[in-house]
Amino acid sequence: MGQLFDLPGLCRRPRRLVVNFNAARHMAYIFHKYKERGIASVPMLLVNGHHPAFYMGAQTKLLVDEPRIIGGVMGQGLQVTASETWGAEVMVPANAEMVIETELSTVDYAIEAPFGEYTQYYAGQKISPVATVTAITRRAQAYYLDIIPGRADHLLLDAPMIEAYLYNRIKDVVPGVTGVHVPISGTARLHAYIQVRKSNDSEPKTVIATALSSDYRIKHVIVVDEDVDIYSDEEVLWAVATRSQWDKDLVVIAGMLGTRLDPSADDTTTAKGGIDATKPKDDSGFPQRIKPAEAYRRLRLEDYFEPAAAV
């Protein structure tokens, strides 16, 4: 443990990494706080190969003690140990497959990217801060955890925390919200489906405005009624098709903060929008949705077809 390695495959120079982080994330907040105070480097850890709940907890959007949140998500306290570089001043996760300790410079920059991103595009190159690797600790037979960019294993690490964060933010404004889902079809970042038990017809647009301003990545919001399954793209799009009129149910807001990983955006400036795909609060004149008859629920095809015929 604590042995120092050269990393020629990670950067053009050994022991150096170029680090990208979005302007709206906690990493940027911490980095600029150090830079404004004239501190030359920020201690930064790269934790590879931990419990999946560790990474889910690390994706919280709260500027609080994240190790405590991680422990809460894991259901047990996060075990930590002193780092090789900073000792007890900076503690590191004790049960990771590998921990890379670095000093992230606030003055040294280099070209970074292109890399595959969650939008399933390669992000363009840009100038980003350089981190110098100071130590690597690992298990004796460590597994290196990797992900496939833009696929489910990448997207789903963050999705539950985005949903929980959005749910709590919107619930404070519109108590009738009953569910939030960020679907993989929208990269689990850019789209949000929100289910609401509305008390008046103005609430869906309030939900849309709250969601779009709560996470810089959320770009399109669709609000549906309780009878629509937000975990089904087919059901949500059915609601858009049959419960929205875009001359009155469409919301468009130009010039909002977005993600530069969206190739249609102007750097971090993007237009956002939402659709109110709910029935009127007074739906007495609105057609009833077809419900499967009880006979359909009892229907068993094997009662009518021989197994060979079914094939």
Image (cartoon, rainbow, N blue to C red):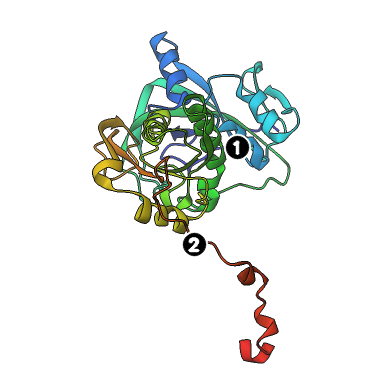
Whole-percent x and y of residue 102? 53, 27
The secondary element bearing badge 1 is classed as helix
Question: How dense is the environment of label 1, judged by Cα within 10 Å: few (below 14), some, or many (20 and up)?
Answer: some
- Amino acid type at mark 2: Ile
Q: How many marks?
A: 2
List the single residue furthest toward the right: 76
Disc ID at residue 251: none
Q: Nearer the viewer, residue 226 or 121?
A: 226
Image quadrant holding the C terminus, namely bottom right
Query: Residue at the spot x=43%, y=36% of the render?
Result: 13
Element carrying mark 2 = loop
Give the residue at x 49% y 53%: 151
Q: Is residue 287 left or right of residue 49?
A: left
Q: Is residue 65 above or below residue 248?
A: above
In the picture, the disc for residue 55 is 1
Is 255 left, or right, of 228 in this rendering?
left
| Quadrant assignment for the N terminus | top right
Q: Amino acid at mark 1?
A: Tyr
- Residue at the disc numbered 2: 290
Residue nearest the viewer, comparing 305 with 25: 305
Residue at the front extreme of this rendering:
284
Looking at this rendering, what residue extends furthest in the top direction? 37
**N-term-proximal mark, 2 vs 1:** 1
Residue at coordinates 40% horizontally, 17% vertically from top-left? 32
State whether residue 72 is above or below residue 252: above
Q: Position of residue 96 (x, y in %)?
A: 68, 37
Query: Image check: 227 left or right of 305?
Result: left
Label 2 or label 1, whichever lies nearer to me, is 2
The residue carrying pointer 2 sits among few (fewer than 14), some (14 to 19) or many (20 or more) residues within 10 Å by Cα, namely: few
Q: CA distance from mark 2 to mark 1?
A: 42 Å
Camera-nearest residue between 290 and 102: 290
Task: Give left or right: position of 177 versus 70.
Answer: left
